[in-house]
Amino acid sequence: MRQKDGTEALNRARKLRRDATEAETRLWQKLRSRRLADSKFRRQVWIGPFIADFLCMDAMLVVEVDGSQHIGDAAYDADRSAYLANKGYRVIRVWNNDVMQRMDDALAAILSALTSVPSPSHAAHGPLPLPVGERAK
């Protein structure tokens, strides 16, 4: 259970940063300091009961780096993604071996998710109405 003052969250996030997997470390080198599409990423961010590997708040995008341990945890990952989606976040998952062996493909997937951000006005109010005289197809 998290302590109200947040020390547990802070300590756990620090431990995850300190003990990052090699794939997380390599990906962080590509995401940090606005290196990908000038997007600000943070790592090991506490969101509700979960800690996201990487978060871009401007895009409300969570990037999770998954290893083989996630193969048997599909239900947990689905619950986690559903929770985050309910809070307005989009989740993209990349595999450790993709980061290690095909970094360009992993970055392209993240970039695609970043650039497919819906307009804030659309997200809050749904699609804009069609101009007068036009019909939906």
Image (cartoon, rainbow, N blue to C red):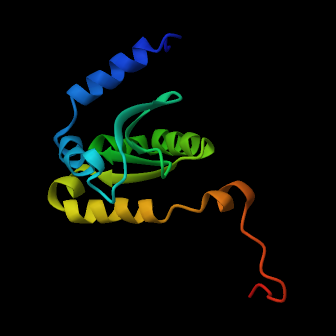
Q: Is residue 39 left or right of residue 121?
A: left
Q: Nearer the viewer, residue 43 or 85?
A: 43
Q: Whole-percent x and y of residue 119?
A: 60, 62
Q: Whole-percent x and y of residue 41?
A: 35, 44
At horizontal 34% and vertical 16% (from top left) the residue drawn is 11
Q: Nearer the viewer, residue 21 or 69?
A: 21
Q: Quadrant of the C terminus?
A: bottom right
53 vs 12: above or below: below
Residue 99 seen in this snapshot:
yes
Q: Is residue 137 left or right of residue 40?
A: right
Q: Nearer the viewer, residue 28 or 93?
A: 28
27 vs 51: above or below: below
Q: Whole-percent x and y of residue 25?
A: 19, 41
Q: Residue furthest right?
A: 133
At horizontal 78% and vertical 73% (from top left) the residue drawn is 129
At horizontal 74% and vertical 58% (from top left) the residue drawn is 125
57 vs 126: above or below: above
5 vs 62: above or below: above
At horizontal 53% and vertical 11% (from top left) the residue drawn is 4
Q: Whole-percent x and y of residue 91?
A: 46, 50
Q: Is residue 126 left or right of residue 107?
A: right
Residue 67 seen in this snapshot:
no
Number of labelled discs? 0
